[in-house]
Amino acid sequence: MLIFQSLTKTELSDALLPLSEAREERDLARISDDLERKLLLSKIEKKKRKQAEMRAKQLFHWVYQRYVTDYDQMTDIAKDVRSWLKENVRIFRLEETFSKQSDDGTYKFLWKLNDTKTIESVIIPAALKEKIGEEVVEALSDGKRYAGIETDRVGLDRELDSDSWARLTACISSQVGCAMACKFCLTGVQGLDRSLDVHEVVTQVHELRMRAPITNIVFMGMGEPLHNVKNIAKACQILLDEDGMNFSKRKVTVSTSGLVPGIDELYQSTDVSLAISLNASTDEQRSQIMPVNKRWNIDQLLDACRRVPLGGHRRITFEYVMLKDFNDSIEDAHRVARLLKGIPAKVNLIPFNEHPGADFKRPEDETVMRFQRTLLNQGYTTTVRISRGRDILAACGQLRSLFGTARGTEKHRDYGKSAEHA
């Protein structure tokens, strides 16, 4: 059986083609002239293709824009087609096993897959909208204004459907666990169980969008997206489809720790935004915390970034997790500025999010500000990420399968307990 969320609109159209009909088919038996017959067959094929494409478009609208997951409710689809769909194309759903709300409005979801493995997704309310006259300004939440939101489904829907948030970002997983073993990331201690299929990736967004009006998608959850590049690239095609979820390519960001061949492959079939986890200013430094650097060093990584076909005013985001007394010096900042010279880039500084068993500490705020000022003075747009959901272990580098599949070292034995009580 096919799975709806694994199909592009073209693939769905191809599956529906045998169900399509054209009135001219009844005239074929009466035509003996070969040329006339070929012309009629071509006309019939075009009509059937057009009908299949129209049905695929309708189905994309029903599932991705109207959030209907029962074929019987799709009233403008012919009954015989609906019957065929029920027998041959399953609309996939993820089972919500666990969800938790942070004091700052962030929601973390644990999903159970068909093989009982688990993954996490997060809804991040990135900014508040405050109207002053006719102006709309963004203000970061202090975490108190939205404290005490009901945690039942009604409370979630009401809060996240409100007009208060300027952006609602879905942080999506690409794998169960991760093979990259970055030393600062909790997901990495789990190891890799498997990569997600296309429908498991797309359905994360679909499920979250049925709960809240998601505006942005970042592939920054569990896993290395470019370690699963074929499925991620296809999922992005579905997410960007104008008859489906209709996300802008600027609103979908794929993050990578530095799998160079995957960067090239990603842009062969899709055109989304790119984020690079740089996290160091020298190869020696980066190799200590990111084993991938031993295979593809900083120069190779940045050369791949220069090959990315950026159009318009688009830039690559370079993420830099700041680790106290390791990569947070002024000298590091100057080296980063030199490395990125000539690349349309912006830098996102991420003060380390501590978790049980971590080997690193979060730098002081003044250290982070000095680092930021240094890059700003070098002409780079530089932001400091206000990490949300830290109290429920939903922030950058803190995601991990909570039940069933989590592995890791003994020093992380308190992880599950911390998350459950958060």
Image (cartoon, grey):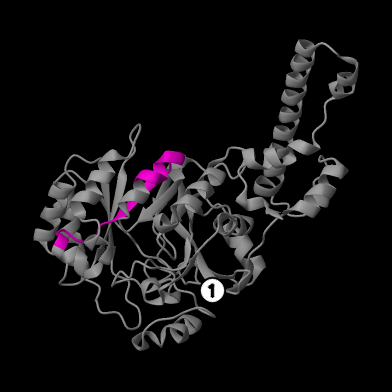
| Residue at the image point whose x is 30% and y is 69% from the top | 182
Whether residue 381 is visible here, answered yes or no, is no
Q: Position of residue 338 (x, y in %)?
A: 12, 48
Whether residue 318 is visible here, answered yes or no, is yes
Q: Quadrant of residue 110?
A: bottom right
| Residue at the image point whose x is 75% and y is 31% from the top | 51
Specify few, some or many for label 1: CA neighbours under 10 Å numbering under 14, 14-19, or 20 or more: many
Query: Can residue 265 be found in the magenta stretch?
Result: yes
**Relative vertical location of residue 293 with respect to residue 231 in this rendering, above or below:** below
Tell me: 411 left or right of 130: left
Tell me: 173 left or right of 303: right
Query: Can residue 90 be found in the magenta stretch?
Result: no
Q: To which residue does mark 1 refer?
A: 100
Q: Position of residue 151 (x, y in %)?
A: 59, 72
Which residue is nearer to you in this view: 357 or 195?
195
Q: Amino acid at mark 1?
A: Lys
Which residue is nearer to you in this view: 18 or 171?
18
Tell me: 63 left or right of 351: right
Which residue is nearer to you in this view: 205 or 178?
178
**Relative vertical location of residue 408 with respect to residue 172 in this rendering, above or below:** below
Is label 1 in a helix, a strand or a loop? strand
Q: Position of residue 325 (x, y in %)?
A: 15, 72
Which stretch is magenta?
Answer: 264-283
The quarter of the picture where the N terminus appears is bottom right
**Relative vertical location of residue 182 with respect to residue 300 in this rendering, above or below:** below
Which residue is nearer to you in this view: 252 or 263?
263
Tell me: 258 left or right of 70: left
Q: Position of residue 310 (x, y in %)?
A: 34, 36
Q: Could you tell me how many numbered marks the image carries?
A: 1
